[in-house]
Amino acid sequence: MVQLDKEVLENVAWISGIGADPTGGTTRLLYDETWLEAQNGVKAKLEEIGMATKFDRIGNLFGRIEGSRYPNETIMSGSHIDTVVNGGKLDGQFGVVAAYLAMKMLQEEHGQPLRSLEVISMAEEEGSRFPFAFWGSKNLFNEAKKEDVMDIADFNGVKFVDAMRQAGFDFKKEDEAIREDIKAFVEIHIEQGNVLEMEQKSVGVVTSIVGQKRYTIVLKGEANHAGTTPMKYRKDAVYAFSKICSQSIDKARVIGEPLVLTFGKVEPKPNTVNVVPGEVLFTMDCRHTDQAALNDFTAEVEADMKQIAAEMGMKIEIDLWMNEPPVPMDTEIIDVLKKASDKAGVNYRTMHSGAGHDSQIIAPHIPTAMIFVPSIGGISHNPAEDTELPDLVEGVKTLAAALYELAYTE
């Protein structure tokens, strides 16, 4: 246990130091120098424990232990290596470190597995450098298309294609076959919320990843003089927005978990002290683990918005620009995680993920499950992001126990 504590601490410190930002946290973006240094560093660590390593064409890294009896059945674990700007020391990269340490521990204790074990350090998930997310996991299943990224550039004007080729990578060949040997994928991740911490649980067994709908909405009333326009003649867009916001959130609170609703961005125009605002642009983010419930609630809210706008003599434009379905995790692997946790006396709970992860891309293709460890204060994507060491260690042990069941038993 002491050794695992030490290894978790050392490896988290090592990887978060690659791309350490002078202003705090870690910044390691797809195809930049620190990203390449981290991928090559992980590659070296995997080779040190006897894994055969390789990159695919776009930069996903794989480390493999061949199975003794069923080498063509692969059990995979890992996460993404990129960060957000000024990110924390755990998001994504802890999943890579934990997979490496879990497989190292399994080899030392049990030798060669029956099925092949594989660590994956995915090229990208965050969309922090270029306006495209899940580049790593989408390429595993040919869901990322060349035309999606051919014309995009980063905030410095560097083209995606140029950055990729500068780092030594290129597009996948169009006729490259999708792997059929991967029989299970288990990703460990920090929760990025405060449920586990509040309930004093060390581990979360994730049952599903929420579906998301995101909107940009514009309310158009009439800008007018704040002093000379009587209240009864106003078409105040902020007032209309406030009614929409209040009414919608009240309804969401009545329904309760796992539904969540957020009005995150609000831009009134002309946004000055002495003018009745004639227009408001705002966003709405709604999430639920059940597609029908998500559809029903958002349809009701959209109808409410239109009714409020009509009653107040305003126009409304509703643009639904993201519509991602909920993704359930594999019930058999969930059972493996629960049984392994029960056997080890792990203090866990089942829960859903309110954030997106590589697992939501992988799950429709491969049996997939996720393990969460607590986030202190629920903080993530922030230099203050942290998890208590005993919880990190418990997470690695839970992952190792699940991988043992999947790769070492008949």
Image (tube, helix red, strand yellow):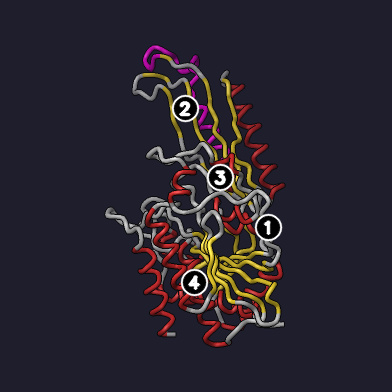
Q: What residue type is labelled 4?
A: Ala
Q: Where is residue 62 in the image (x, y as percent from the top left)?
A: 55, 66
Q: Residues within 10 Å of mark 3 (few under 14, many from 20)?
A: many
Residue drawn at (67%, 70%), measured in percent from left and top?
333
Q: According to the image, label 2 marks what residue?
A: 238
> Residue shown at 39%/59% (left/top)?
88
Mark 1 secondary-structure assignment: loop
Q: Is mark 2 on a helix, strand or loop?
A: helix
Residue bearing the label numbered 3: 261
Mostly what secondary structure, the magenta segment? helix
Q: Marks 4 and 2: CB-CB under 8 Å? A: no
Mark 4, secondary structure of its residue:
helix
Which numbered mark, 3 or 1, is in the foreground of this view? 1
Q: Which of marks 4 and 2 is nearer the N terminus?
A: 4
- What residue did someone put label 4 on? 98
Q: What element carries label 3?
A: strand
The residues tagged by marks 3 and 2 sit, at their Cα atoms, a distance apart of 19 Å
Q: Where is residue 252 in the image (x, y as percent from the top left)?
A: 59, 45
Residue density around tag 2, few if under 14, some if 14–19, many if 20 or more, within 10 Å:
many
Which residue does the image show at 38% across and 79% down from the upper left? Answer: 6
* Amino acid type, callout 3: Leu
Disc 3 and disc 1: Cα gap in Å?
A: 37 Å
First in sequence: mark 3 or mark 1?
1
Magenta range: 225-248
Q: Residue furthest left?
A: 22
Vertical comparison of 240 with 192: above or below: above
